[in-house]
Amino acid sequence: MFLNENVLKKLNETLTQSRKSHFNKNRIPDRKIVSIEEFKRLPFTTKDDIINNSPNGFVCVPKKELYQYHDTFSFSGGSSVSWFTKSELIECAKKINSGGIGFNEDDRVLVRFPYALSTTAHFTHIAAQMKNACVIPTSSKNNITPFTRIVYMMKKLDVTVLATMPIQALLIAETAQMMGYNIKSDFTALRAIYTAGEALTPTMRKSIERMWGVPIYDYFSTTEVGPVMIECEHRNTHPLDENFLFEVLDENLDKEVEAGKTGALAITTLNKKATPLIRYLTGDRARILYKECACGRKISMEIEGRKRDSVIVEDREFDVWILEEMVSYLPVNGMWLSIPYRNGIKFLIEKHADDDEVTEEMIKWLEENYRVPVFVDFVEKGSLHSRYELLKKENEFKYKDNEFYMEYMPYYSKSISCAELFNKKILYRTNILFQKWKV
């Protein structure tokens, strides 16, 4: 990290602004920073800090300047919140439009990100309309726009850009196939998929692009600050270093790792006025690559998921990128998960065809190349992700006399076992409170 005169000026302005908040007024020293060493002595900001001081603990502008509020729910309790001024919202949209997706007046952009309190859908919506594109705001995980209706709208409305999370792009494709569509020949208007919201590994990217036959453009953002990195037209991810200071730190958070090495990502905002953040530990793992891109930028960055999503085996960490890479050598065409098992890694894979098989040679190759014992179990399709919701139609879920029930289930039988009903994954993914289901 290099602090030139311009960056140093922005940094000191941000530090001055941050001291206006209740949280930082006594944490950030009331003096100018003149060196990297001084900067690195500043305290970190964690997600717990934001949660514990929500909703107003980080606000640094008068109430009348606050224009939009967002937050994300934490299972540990509380919410990680963010506030934006009107100019900051516009700036977030401009950041998106500086990337390679290239929204234009001929586009019809179907936004499948969740709109409720999250930032990505709103920023994408504004960015597309800023370029005179037509926006189709469908949101996600609701009874108004189930997967079947998304497929229908994509076909009927000649959608040119599908803006959604990577896993949703896969599920929409699977829904289309179950509805009898040929994805590549029936959705010829589609020119690109725009993703955000979760780590997009190279393996996942290839899988989605292979299914849809169009390129993916990805961007990385956080609820707290908005877009942080953007993918250019050459599909390399570049940090927005005119807006942030980036640190990729070792496990102890003592020093920055070498270029090309993976570490913990911390960001410091340089232009945010409403809720500036100092050395914010995002919880993401990243690595910086110093290599000139054809777009002219000299720095790229790869986000490799969160530490909590990694599998730890005898002090060795297998992050999402490595796990995706490993499972790509197995017969996988859909959902899978991995868990630590007998000092190794077990992959649970949904079986799609009767002849799906993992050979001893596959296992041996993985164990030799990744130096870890590997175990594989096949499970029935739908075990890891309930498929009945894919073909669920509008208003299928009914509510009567304090009971939820289903009018029909085109993919699954109406008869549902207790074991399946109380499977945490199904309850979590369908997001329905079953109060008096009769089984």
Image (cartoon, rainbow, N blue to C red):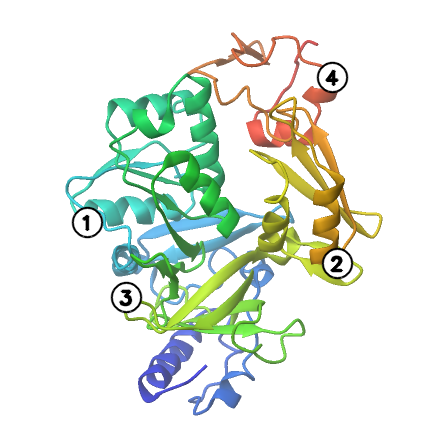
User: Of label 4 and label 1, which has the lower sequence position?
Assistant: 1
In the picture of the structure, the residue carrying the numbered disc 1 is: 130
Q: Which of these two is toward me, 412 or 77?
A: 412
Farthest residue toward the right? Answer: 342
In the picture of the structure, the residue carrying the numbered disc 3 is: 295
Secondary structure found at label 1: helix
User: Of label 3 and label 1, which has the lower sequence position?
Assistant: 1
Q: Quadrant of residue 291?
A: bottom left
Is there a contact, CB below 8 Å, between mark 3 and mark 1? Answer: no
Q: Which of the labelled discs sits on residue 418, or is there none? A: 4
Q: Which of these two is toward me, 5 or 220?
A: 220
Q: Residue at x 28, y 55 (%)?
A: 100
Q: CA distance from mark 3 to mark 1?
A: 22 Å
User: Of label 3 and label 4, which has the lower sequence position?
Assistant: 3
User: Of label 2 and label 1, which has the lower sequence position?
Assistant: 1
Residue 29 is left or right of residue 273, and the answer is right
How many numbered circles are shown? 4
Give the residue type at disc 3: Cys
Q: Residue at x 68, y 20 (%)?
A: 421
Q: CA distance from mark 4 to mark 1?
A: 50 Å
